[in-house]
Amino acid sequence: MNKSLVLFVTLLALSCQKKTENLNLREGLHISNVSIITTEDGNYSPYIGHLVAEKDKIVYIGENEPPISGKFEKIDGTGKFVVSGLIDNHVHITEVQGMLPHHMEKYPELTKEFNSQMPKSYLYYGFTTLINLGGISKEQITSFDQGPYKPDLYHTGYSGASVANGYPMNFAPEENRFETTPNFIFIESEANNIPDKFDPADHTPKAVVERIKKSGAIAVKSYYESGFRGMPKLPVPTKSIMKELLEESRSNELVLTVHGNSLEAHSFLADVGVDVIAHGLWNWEEYKDAPRDSLPLPIKETLDLQIQKQIGYTPTLTVIAGEEALADDAFLNLPELKKVVPNKLLEWYKTEEGQWFAKELFSEFDVEMVHGIYGNIQAHAMQALKYLSDNDGFILFGTDTPSAPTYGNQPGYNGYWELKLMKEAGVPLNKILSSATINNAKAFHLDASIGSLKTGKKANMVIMSKNPLKEIEAYNSIEKVVVGGEVIHRGDLGVKD
Ligand SMILES: [Zn+2]
């Protein structure tokens, strides 16, 4: 062997066993011998290894134990599993579940207790990142961020980009609906119903998106909803409004996510090619009586177009389940709820007054009828989701907690429920985990900092005693949650008995 060849071989050998650098930590965390479950592209190859964080960043991840010195907390991960912190891309942290504003005013104590528990309840089920998809005020953002234990919160501005008098503006009292929806969009058909003091120039898609961008949002929320439950027909965006919203969002590096759950909405949004649809396709309109195991051609074609364009699809199955829950007395006695809802509020839900929404929805139906109707809608929602999953649709995890003033969508628990319903629909466990981590991070342009376990990313993670690629119950076997490098024991997150 000549000299240069020897040198080459030696160099090759050296580079193969690249020595792990010593990690000198000041505020470190070392999770040792843990099963690491992470992905960049949806494929998982779990392995037992080590994960090291310094302050809020991951600084090492790999099979070999690196030499570590300095100050750090060590967690023995033997027999445990670590995943990237879960992301829920559709929540409303501005609500108190089951209450309307007048209830919150009447019961400030219940409201206060709920709001101080709510961020912890999300963490209790492993959600370290939330995206608030609706109106939120500066004060609400600040107050959420002040909590001692809280997920990272992202938002879509001080109001959604709803067309004038469209959904969900229609729920606001007429006297201040335009004031409380500062980002409403001018639409010609409503020109005569918009108070004169609002200048249409301030309510073009361009002006609205720029305002949303300035508020520190990461996405624009819009809506395509012509009404439900006997509402009068609501105005919906025209194609040119939606296209302009999409273009303006993209040129401002924002994501356009749009409410829609009907065939009409999904096909409109698929055609425009929005980034994310904030709900699944469960309102099959003229196909609403289709057999539970069938997929009518127009539904299939709409889903095919979404798959082809890789539009983010957010099933939000708990929207249906969380309303249906109001028909069942058993729901409020679920032991899991005691960990995420203050006891006094749980008690209030059981009172005459607390049952207001249940009465409004279901007073004319018996329980069996409710389950019949909702069961059918849910079967269709699951059918659409299964098709998307089988055909490599871009599935994103989102709950819409709460989707209505229902106590059926509780923070944290609702996320666990959603995960279980996705499993029930037939989505494989690896795809469920990706939907709540890397897919959401990519869809909302957050993947440079979260969504997977990788050197340089934020130390947001969940340590479980069961394997989430083997059983869905793993998501209820959480032992510790790490947010920005801070280790929180699950026991410190639940409501105290
Ligand atoms: Zn919502």
Image (cartoon, grey):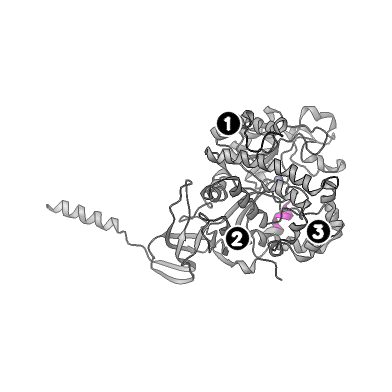
Mark 3 secondary-structure assignment: helix
Q: Is residue 140 magenta?
A: yes
Q: Is residue 164 above or below residue 63?
A: above
Residue at 76% x, 38% y is 167
Kindly tell me whether mark 1's CB lies below 8 Å from ligand 1.
Answer: no
Task: Indicate which disc, 2 or 3, sits on the residue closer to the N terminus.
Answer: 3
Image quarter of the C terminus: bottom right
Q: Which of the labelled discs sits on residue 476, or is there none?
A: 2
Decide if residue 359 is on the left or right side of residue 244.
right
Instruction: Say which residue label 1 marks.
Output: 305
Q: Position of residue 379 (x, y in %)?
A: 66, 42
Residue 322 visible in the displayed image: yes
Gap between marks 1 and 3, in whole Å?
Answer: 42 Å
Q: Residue furthest left?
A: 1
Q: Position of residue 272 (x, y in %)?
A: 62, 30
Residue at 70% x, 47% y is 319
Q: Which residues are magenta?
A: 136-142
Mark 1 secondary-structure assignment: helix
Gap between marks 2 and 1, in whole Å?
Answer: 35 Å
Instruction: Say which residue label 3 marks.
Output: 349
Mark 2 secondary-structure assignment: helix
Residue 278 visible in the displayed image: no
